[in-house]
Image (cartoon, rainbow, N blue to C red):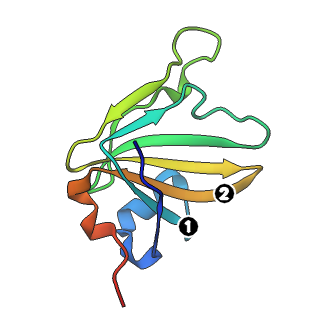
Amino acid sequence: MYQAPIKLNCKDVPKYLKGLFGYTGRKFRLVVCTEVHIPMTAGLWSGGSREEYQVVRLADGCGIEPVNHNASPFNAGRRDTNVRLEPGIAVVRQSDFCGKNMGLTFYVHPENATPLLPREV
């Protein structure tokens, strides 16, 4: 079960996490959860829209687990995947909607949410 995404201030996102997927924008969101569902259509374009996912270490932004984006859609290589989040690990989603980049969404374990949460003024 997901909570509503929290809009993140660009300044609160570590620099090494900002450039995932080659992203250079300023739109970031955070979802605190313990499991992420990645659909088998991840990485495929449909009507000018797509979602790509990476599983990364929060400490340095390095990818740790490939997501089956490159598998052929015409065989059994593509499948829905559920990623169980553990402390120190995040799933990052990059979304394009009707050709417009919608930014990065970080799915993190509750133990890792505090450093990324927006600071109160």
Residue in the foreground of this view, choosing between 4 and 116: 4
Residue type at numbered disc 1: Lys
For residue 27, the mark is 1
Whole-percent x, y for residue 9 in the image:
45, 76
Residue occupying the point 28% across, 55% down = 58
Looking at the rendered structure, the secondary structure element under dot 1 is loop
Residue on which the image places disc 2: 101
Q: Are marks 2 and 1 in contact (CB under 8 Å)?
A: yes
Residue occupying the point 60% across, 17% down = 72
Whole-percent x, y for residue 89 in the image:
27, 46
What is the C-alpha distance between the residues marked 2 and 1? Answer: 9 Å
Whole-percent x, y for residue 85 in the image:
28, 41
Residue occupying the point 39% across, 60% down = 17
Residue occupying the point 33% across, 46% down = 56
Q: Is residue 39 above or below residue 90?
A: above
Residue in the foreground of this view, choosing between 29 and 94: 29
